[in-house]
Amino acid sequence: MKWTQHSIPIGIALALELAIAHTTAAITPNAAIELYGSKKPLISNVKKIQLAQSNPPPPPTNPGSSSAGGRRDPSNCPRDPGTAARPLLTALSPTAKPGFTLVERPTFLIYVPKTSAKNAEFSLRSRSGQGVYRTTVALTHTPDLIRITLPTQSSPLELGKLYTWSFAVICNPDDRLDDRFVTGMVQRIELDPTRLRQIQQASPKEQAILYQKADVWYDALAVLFQLTRRERNEPDMLKAWRELLQSGGVDTMIDNNFEQANPR
């Protein structure tokens, strides 16, 4: 599979390889999640992945490294002001549990603090480092909560296969080693047909609950993102959003940018 665009910069590729290496964990077969006390496996043909809990040290030639769902050191682009008391550049990807999805082309969310950078770059790679999709994102106004959904022309995620995605803020187009970026991990799974049908027939609010109970984190996030945008004044929606972020080890302060949320 070839990149949709030209290859990713060497500095980012090196950091991604190290991030993947440090987040590789034990794999055990026959993983299953129980819902509502059922003894039937909800997930079939899935490898259980346990992500590393601590950030790997940055490579000496690239200051922009971060672990899955993590954040790089607390600095913006060199020309930007500090971000004390505000969320940093953050990949909305779980750190305390696997990032599961049921869909072939999932949605990813990234919080971008105020920055002078004009563009960013999103990329998706297989665990072996093979490029799957890459696109440039215009940073028209920040802070911003950016949504990226894989397009129909991109290859679908394969069942049971682990992927790493990254989002790089391009501080200096002439020196990509100045990029500030974060990474996340995603794995497509499938549920027991009965449970899947239950989710498909549920209301959006019920879907968010069922996804979360089944640990399908990315799909729960995508549903809650839409619900919270439509129902900004609903305390229950904001509470559910914060609880989901907290369950994945993501900064729960990232809930005040929906007016500016910018779908791609």
Image (cartoon, grey):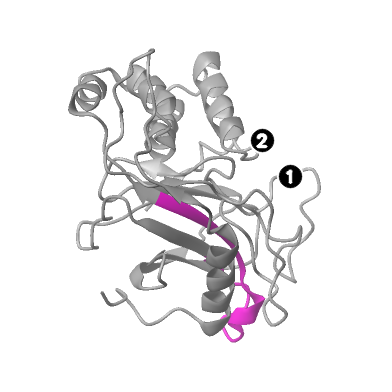
Q: Quadrant of residue 198?
A: top left
Whole-percent x and y of residue 119? 51, 68
Circle 2: is it few (<14), some (14-19), or many (20+) Cα within 10 Å?
few
Q: Quadrant of residue 169?
A: bottom right
Say what amino acid the circle numbered 1 marks.
Answer: Arg
- The label on residue 86 is 1
Whether residue 192 is visible to the viewer of this picture, yes or no, is yes
Quarter containing the N terminus: bottom left
Q: Is residue 30 left or right of residue 236?
A: left
Say what amino acid the circle numbered 2 marks.
Answer: Met
Looking at marks 1 and 2 on the same chain, the residue that comes earlier in the sequence is marked by 1
User: Could you give the CA–CA distance between mark 1 and mark 2, rounded to whole angstroms?
Assistant: 8 Å
Which residue corresponds to the image point at 32% horizontal and 75% vertical from the top-left? 3
Circle 1: is it few (<14), some (14-19), or many (20+) Cα within 10 Å?
few
Q: Are marks 1 and 2 in contact (CB under 8 Å)?
A: yes
Q: Is residue 117 magenta?
A: no
Report the number of numbered marks: 2
**Location of residue 118 with respect to 157 vertically, above or below:** below
Does dot 1 land on a helix, a strand or a loop?
Answer: loop
Q: Which portion, as a residue range, is magenta? A: 168-186
**Location of residue 19 with respect to 35 vertically, above or below:** below
Does dot 2 land on a helix, a strand or a loop?
Answer: loop
**Location of residue 31 with respect to 67 vertically, above or below:** above
Q: Is residue 15 left or right of residue 127?
A: right
- The label on residue 18 is none
Whole-percent x and y of residue 262? 44, 48
Which residue corresponds to the image point at 56% horizontal and 66% vertical from the top-left? 21
Identify the residue position indicated by label 2 in the image: 253
Whether residue 230 is visible to the viewer of this picture, yes or no, is no
Residue 189 vs residue 258, the one in the foreground: 189
